[in-house]
């Protein structure tokens, strides 16, 4: 403390209520001595704030010579934590107030004027406080700034100011929101002041203030008002009067409330009650309508107390519905009349009304005076009757509708049961399973105690085929009797009556044996329907009620009748299947014999195929050898003829024109003869063409035979389609030149790769073009194009030659017998057949289209190469 040079402020200045800036100024007087620092500590400890000094040197550094312990109360920080870094306090300033704080400090330093500032801070614990700060700057001799400061907590004051402002604003808003006129009126009826904002008034303030009641109001209204003013001032009690005034909108009703507001003056609050008056009239009319609706409503309407359920009023429909008269019901509770079938329904209704005030369309069962149970839709609301909460309830009788709905559900279940039984009969051949499932579901549907199917057999007597029974009652399964008279009586009961309906076995006339049978198996009621196969009684479908007598509904009888018809179908189906099984046994034996015969024939056909293959290979080999030999001889002969023609040309030049004829001849030596035989060149060329066609046909036959037996072997690889076609054009060039044909290539170079066997695919293209060349005169024009469609490349070869019929187009790629008059048809047809085999092996399709104008368009598709295929090494 001895190191701190601080003027000490006497406590007297604090007690005098001086402002902080005054305290700071007075601290610089000569009578303030450093020895008074302990006194300053005492003052700081009793202040709701913080005293501090800040020394800011010329180099910008900041030193805090002193800070009081009030910073802990104000900022929730210890003085020791703040002295090293005074910016910690600045960081607590509310974000929206930081800019104003920085600007005010800058102004204070520049002008050396006292600093006064109010702002918000957020303490480390999250509290929002209002603070008031005061600083007195002092310029030191060395050019440093010494700041003397005090920060006070003014949160309570700010909160009180905010509450006061809120209260004033609220009261002003309430006053402004009141649409009523307010007048200050003296005892003698003079208007002293008024408040007319928000009210519908035609006169201005100047036209009212200073005037008397007699001057502005009709005489009768003025007299009533004058009496009310006097009574209010004399009694000091609020007085109310109502009156009517003519206005531009017609006659309007007003209500004036008068209270004492000063000596010999009242405050009159005037409200337009025209709408209320009209509402009261409408309410009276509505009450009359409600009374009529209450009495004439076809639905039961009751008014009862909320807590007890005691009836206050009921209408005629309630009397007709419940059976209780008005005198019997009014004054009694619903529990005393035993109306609730389930007491919890009343409790649930009251709970819902207490929570929401309304209940809508609750299905409630009620008991009539006669004991009959009815179902109603209950809607209710809570109303106030002279301060007593009551229930206005409307009951709509839906008993008949519920019965109809139950009947419809019953019919739907019956139809479902019949449909499921029919499906089982059609989908299953297991008769025992069908019968057992049927009796189980019928018993569940009828809620009967026992359902079973009995068999009528002349040899076996009566036998139970299937049964479903409640475990509480005895089973009829396994029961039998040899008494033929008794069995015949049971048969006659069904055969004669068709459907036997017994609602109470004690009320029917039957033999002692039948009654004993019913007593043994505890049968109280029975419903039996015969199962007829044609005109023969096969058995019966029987339902028993063992718990007591039962009234069998028509729909239940109808169900058993339809079920018996379905069971008859199932039994007939089972009998047919049994006969079919016997026929199948005989048929299997016949099939075995026939299979053995077919196997023997197949062996014979296989032997014939082997013989055919041997003959085909042998004959084809011999023919091929002969044809190839002929070709060799003819080609040599043709070459010799060309050589002879050259020599003949030299000799004929001097002989004058005989060389032309000799150029068309070849010398063919004959056996045992020295002189050659001349042969025309065209004949030799035709012989060579014929042998070429025979060789092609033989090769095609061999290839087709191999394909049919082993399939076409292809080697698929990713191929650039445009490159493949380019190499194919090189093969086609001699053929196109020979036939004076042209080929226009429209295939793009950027087409995707295809998976293809390049060699076989080239043959396909060559064969298709060769087909058109061989079936058309020279000068044919071709157009080749390709497109990508759905993961495939579609190639089209179009010519402008002769067309074909649709039948010919459809059969072009089939293997069939050709026209014998067409010398080229067989070999060409075999090539077309092989083309389709090759394209199919690639996974594509091939075909031909007859163009509308002229010519044909051959097309085939090939699959695109996949990424996995293109990446293979």
Image: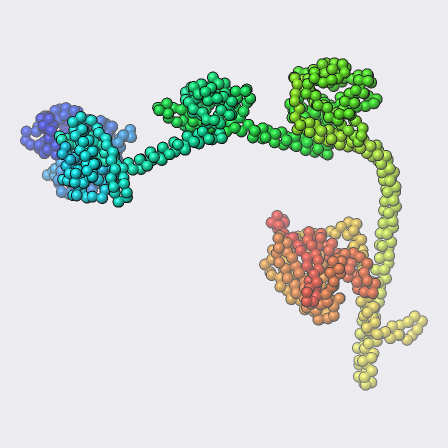
Whether residue 226 can be seen here: yes
For the residue pair 28 and 553, the one nearer the viewer reads as 553
Q: How is the image coloured?
A: rainbow
Q: Quadrant of residue 756?
A: bottom right
Q: Is residue 734 left or right of residue 626?
A: left
Query: In this rendering, would 321 be left or right of 595?
Result: left
Question: Is residue 98 visible to the viewer in this orientation of the structure?
Answer: no
Most distant residue in the left direction = 30
Q: How many marks?
A: 0
The spot of residue 847 in percent (x, y) is 70, 58
Left or right placement of residue 350 versus residue 533 in this view: left
The residue shown at (78%, 17%) is 480
Name the residue: 13% across, 38% down: 114
Residue, x 83% and y 63% (percent of image)?
A: 820
Task: Establish if 828 lies above or below 431.
Answer: below
Above or below 595: residue 344 = above
Q: Position of residue 174 (x, y in %)?
A: 25, 35
Q: In front: 332, or 153?
A: 332
Vertical placement of 283 versus 774: above or below? above
Q: Position of residue 183 (x, y in %)?
A: 19, 36
């Amino acid at each position: 403390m001895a190191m701190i040079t601080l003027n000490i402020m006497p406590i007297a200045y604090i007690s005098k209520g001086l402002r902080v800036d005054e305290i700071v100024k007075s601290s610089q007087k000569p009578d303030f001595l450093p020895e008074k620092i302990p006194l300053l500590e005492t003052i700081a400890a009793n202040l709701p704030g913080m005293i501090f000094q800040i020394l800011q040197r010329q180099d910008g550094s900041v030193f805090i010579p002193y800070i009081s312990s009030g910073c802990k109360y104000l900022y929730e920080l210890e003085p020791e934590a703040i002295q090293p870094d005074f910016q910690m306090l600045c960081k607590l300033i509310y974000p929206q107030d930081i800019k104003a704080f920085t600007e005010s400090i800058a102004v204070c330093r520049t002008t050396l004027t006292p600093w006064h500032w109010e702002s918000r801070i957020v303490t480390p614990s999250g509290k929002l406080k209002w603070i008031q700060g005061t600083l007195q700057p002092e310029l030191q001799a060395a050019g440093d700034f010494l700041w003397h400061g005090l920060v006070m907590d003014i949160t309570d004051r700010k909160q009180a100011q905010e509450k006061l402002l809120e209260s004033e604003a609220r009261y002003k808003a309430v006053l402004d929101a009141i649409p009523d006129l307010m007048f200050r009126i003296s005892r003698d009826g003079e208007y002293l002041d008024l408040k007319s904002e928000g009210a519908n008034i035609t006169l201005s303030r100047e036209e009212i203030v200073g005037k008397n009641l007699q001057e502005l109001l009709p005489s009768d209204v003025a007299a009533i008002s004058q009496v009310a003013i006097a009574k209010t001032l004399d009694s000091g009690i609020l007085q109310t009067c109502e009156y009517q005034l003519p206005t531009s909108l017609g006659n309007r009703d007003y209500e004036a409330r008068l209270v004492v507001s000063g000596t010999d003056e009242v405050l009159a609050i005037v409200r337009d009650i025209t709408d209320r008056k009209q509402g009261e009239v409408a309410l009276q009319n509505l009450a009359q309508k409600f009374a009529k609706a209450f009495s004439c409503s076809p639905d039961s309407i009751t008014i009862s107390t909320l807590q007890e359920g005691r009836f206050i009023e009921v209408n005629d429909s309630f009397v007709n519905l419940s059976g209780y008269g008005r005198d019997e019901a009014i004054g009694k509770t619903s529990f005393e009349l035993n109306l609730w079938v389930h007491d919890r329904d009343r409790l649930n209704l009251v709970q819902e009304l207490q929570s929401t005030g309304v209940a809508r369309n609750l299905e409630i069962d009620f008991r009539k005076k006669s004991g009959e149970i009815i179902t109603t839709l209950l809607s209710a609301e809570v109303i106030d009757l002279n301060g007593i909460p009551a229930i206005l309830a409307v009951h709509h009788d839906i008993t008949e509708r519920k019965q109809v709905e139950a009947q419809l559900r019953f019919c739907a279940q019956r139809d479902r049961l019949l449909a499921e039984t029919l499906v089982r009969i059609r989908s299953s051949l297991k008769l025992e399973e069908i019968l057992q499932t049927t009796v189980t579901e019928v018993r569940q549907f009828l809620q009967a105690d026992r359902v079973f199917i009995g068999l009528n057999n002349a040899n076996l007597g009566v036998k139970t085929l299937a049964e479903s029974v409640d475990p509480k009652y005895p089973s009829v399964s396994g029961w039998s009797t040899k008494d033929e008279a008794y069995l015949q009586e049971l048969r006659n009961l069904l055969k004669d009556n068709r459907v036997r309906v017994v609602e109470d076995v004690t009320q029917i006339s039957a033999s002692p044996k039948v009654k004993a049978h019913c007593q043994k198996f505890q049968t109280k009621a029975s419903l039996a329907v015969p199962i007829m196969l044609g005109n023969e009684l096969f058995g019966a479908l029987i339902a028993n009620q063992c718990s007591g007598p039962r009234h069998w509904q028509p729909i239940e009888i109808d169900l058993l009748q339809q079920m018996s018809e379905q069971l008859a179908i199932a039994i007939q189906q089972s009998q047919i299947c049994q006969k079919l099984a016997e026929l199948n046994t005989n048929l299997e034996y016949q099939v075995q014999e026939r299979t053995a015969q077919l196997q023997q024939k197949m062996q014979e056909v296989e032997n014939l195929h082997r013989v055919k293959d041997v003959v085909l290979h042998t004959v084809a080999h011999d023919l091929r050898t002969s044809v190839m030999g002929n070709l060799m001889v003819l080609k040599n002969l043709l070459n010799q003829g060309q050589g002879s023609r050259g020599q003949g040309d030299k000799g004929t030049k001097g002989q004058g024109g005989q060389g032309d004829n000799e150029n068309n001849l070849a010398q063919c030596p004959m056996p045992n003869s020295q002189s050659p035989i001349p042969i025309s060149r065209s004949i030799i060329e035709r012989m060579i063409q014929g042998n070429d066609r025979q060789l092609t046909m033989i090769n095609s036959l061999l290839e087709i035979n191999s394909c049919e037996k082993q399939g076409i072997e292809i080697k698929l690889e990713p191929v650039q389609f445009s490159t493949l076609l380019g190499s194919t054009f090189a093969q086609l060039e001699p053929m196109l030149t020979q036939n004076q044909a042209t080929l226009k290539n429209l295939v793009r170079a950027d087409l995707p790769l295809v998976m293809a066997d390049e060699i076989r695919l080239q043959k396909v293209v060559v064969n298709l073009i060769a087909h058109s060349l061989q079936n058309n005169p020279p000068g044919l024009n071709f157009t080749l194009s390709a497109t990508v469609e759905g993961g495939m490349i579609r190639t089209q070869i179009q010519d402008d030659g002769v067309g074909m019929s649709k039948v010919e187009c459809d059969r072009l790629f089939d293997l069939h017998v050709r026209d014998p008059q067409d010398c080229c048809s067989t070999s060409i047809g075999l090539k077309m057949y092989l083309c389709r085999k090759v394209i199919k092996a690639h996974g594509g399709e091939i075909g031909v289209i007859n163009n509308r104008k002229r010519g044909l368009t051959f097309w085939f598709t090939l699959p695109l190469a996949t990424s996995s295929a293109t990446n293979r090494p």
